[in-house]
Image: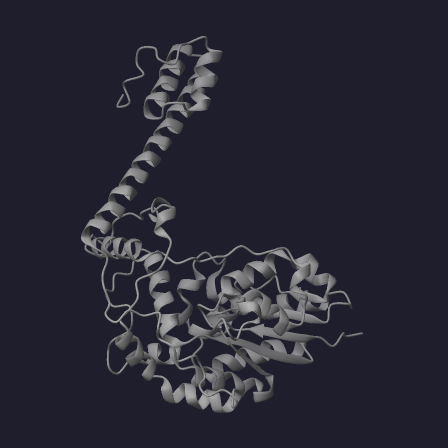
């Protein structure tokens, strides 16, 4: 007998606590199952990116397909059968399935694309709820700026998009009335659950608790979820922006470079760079009509869709001082230097172990272990290995890291 189940389809939007929500869902599969909820597992990880890949255009989802076996074609060919098999295999006490894919916000632009998801889900569920969180557009832009800098390939100096008119894809990204209307036009107005991502509107001021309440499960029975995606401070942002600008000047064929983020240090977190108050007001005004139409349709009792307080912004935007950016750069270089020493020490230890295992060459092994200590004094594996060989760690050769 087919069990009538409902689907809660969380479509973001981006920059509304989605990473924390998705980690909570991934960490609590068993606990949620005890409450009658199942988080889909065949949709491409905690962030269900296969949904956007399945429904979206090749151009809009090309980056999402990196590392996906078989790419977009494989997802589109196999996802319907895999999803059906997963849902039909659920035990009878599971009455709600959860999807969470915020890329459905930024990557799906047409009713035809959303309809592909309706065709995918409607045969499997007796009811579908589209859950969407909306954050004031200027705040999204500020958060998105920091996220893009983390990618180390973004070097735009302006925090807020400044062109007039905005490029169509940018306008649609921030036009929430168009977004909600597109989904309501396919799944129906009654299927939409629109919530506001601002402290006064979230349960306990917390996105994860609010999401749990919106879905109907008990968050208190779940493992806690650590805070994710904390903001880089203004100095770290400016350093990464300048590095990205230099990298763009390098040949396109240059080899991939390791991420610099681990070397920024804990003091790189903190208040991000902010635009001036007037610039934030001008950007928000671009969406005043869209926001008002959405307010009238879904929040008629509110005087405005979002809080109109712009007090977090300075009167005028200020860039970090050159000395601060220089200090951050020096700290990063020192961190990179320490990592190079660590890697060289590990390489020397490996060569020493190989000399013993392959050739039984105790003299060469001892030399390599001393080299490891020259690169990184106190390296425990090298110290133990030298002790086992009956050698002193400060013997001749320890000052030859270039050998």
The colour scheme applied to this rendered structure is one colour
* Image mark count: 0
Locate residue 307, reporting x and y percent. 43, 79
Residue 46 is at least partly visible in this image: no
Q: Is residue 357 above or below residue 324?
A: above
Locate residue 243, reporting x and y percent. 24, 52
Q: Image point 45% across, 23% down: which residue? A: 380
Farthest residue in the top direction? 390
Q: Image point 65% across, 63% down: which residue? A: 219
Left of 165 or right of it: where is 100?
right
Quarter of the image with the C terminus in it: top left
Farthest residue in the right direction? 1
Locate residue 54, reporting x and y percent. 51, 71
Of 281 and 133, nearer the camera is: 281
Q: Image point 53% across, 82% down: which residue? A: 115
Q: Image point 31% across, 10% down: which residue? A: 396
Of 383 and 70, nearer the camera is: 383
Q: Is residue 298 above or below residue 227?
A: below
Left of 101 or right of it: where is 66?
left
Of 331 and 351, nearer the camera is: 331
Left of 315 or right of it: where is 120?
right
Residue 70 is at least partly visible in this image: yes
Locate residue 50, reporting x and y percent. 52, 66
Q: Is residue 199 above or below residue 303?
A: above
Quarter of the image with the N terminus in it: bottom right
């Amino acid at each position: 007998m087919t069990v009538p189940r409902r689907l809660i389809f969380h479509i973001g939007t981006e920059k509304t606590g989605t990473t924390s929500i998705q980690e909570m869902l991934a960490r609590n599969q068993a606990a949620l199952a005890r409450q009658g909820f199942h988080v889909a597992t065949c949709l491409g990880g905690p962030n269900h990116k296969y949904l956007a890949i399945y429904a979206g255009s090749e151009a809009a989802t090309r980056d999402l397909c990196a590392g996906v076996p078989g790419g977009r074609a494989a997802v589109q060919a196999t996802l319907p059968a895999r999803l059906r098999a997963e849902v039909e295999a659920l035990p009878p006490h599971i009455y709600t399935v959860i999807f969470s894919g915020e890329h459905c916000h930024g990557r799906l632009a047409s009713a035809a694309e959303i309809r592909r998801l309706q065709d995918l889900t409607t045969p499997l569920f007796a009811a579908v709820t589209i859950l969407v969180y909306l954050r004031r557009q200027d705040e999204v832009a500020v958060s998105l700026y920091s996220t893009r800098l983390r990618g180390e390939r973004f070097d735009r100096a302006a925090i807020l998009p400044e062109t007039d008119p905005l490029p169509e894809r940018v306008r649609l990204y921030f036009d929430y009335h168009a977004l909600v209307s597109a989904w309501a036009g396919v799944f129906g107005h009654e299927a939409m659950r629109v919530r506001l991502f601002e402290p006064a509107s979230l349960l306990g001021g917390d996105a994860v608790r609010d999401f749990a309440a919106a879905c109907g499960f008990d968050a208190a029975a779940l493992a806690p979820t650590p805070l994710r995606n904390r903001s880089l401070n203004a100095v770290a942002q400016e350093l990464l922006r300048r590095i990205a600008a230099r990298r763009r000047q390098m040949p396109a064929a240059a080899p991939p470079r390791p991420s610099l983020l681990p070397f920024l240090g804990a003091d790189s977190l903190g208040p991000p760079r902010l635009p001036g108050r007037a610039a934030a007001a001008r950007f928000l005004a671009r969406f005043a009509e869209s926001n008002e139409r959405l307010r009238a349709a879904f929040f008629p009792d509110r005087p405005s869709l979002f809080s109109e307080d712009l007090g977090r912004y300075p009167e005028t935007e200020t860039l970090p001082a050159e000395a601060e950016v220089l200090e951050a750069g020096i700290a990063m270089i020192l961190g990179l230097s320490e990592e190079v020493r660590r890697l060289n020490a590990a390489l020397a230890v490996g060569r020493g172990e190989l000399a013993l295992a392959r050739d039984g060459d105790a003299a060469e092994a001892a030399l390599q272990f001393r080299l490891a200590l020259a690169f990184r004094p106190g390296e425990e594996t090298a110290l133990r290995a030298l002790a086992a060989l009956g050698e002193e760690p400060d013997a001749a050769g320890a000052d030859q890291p270039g050998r």
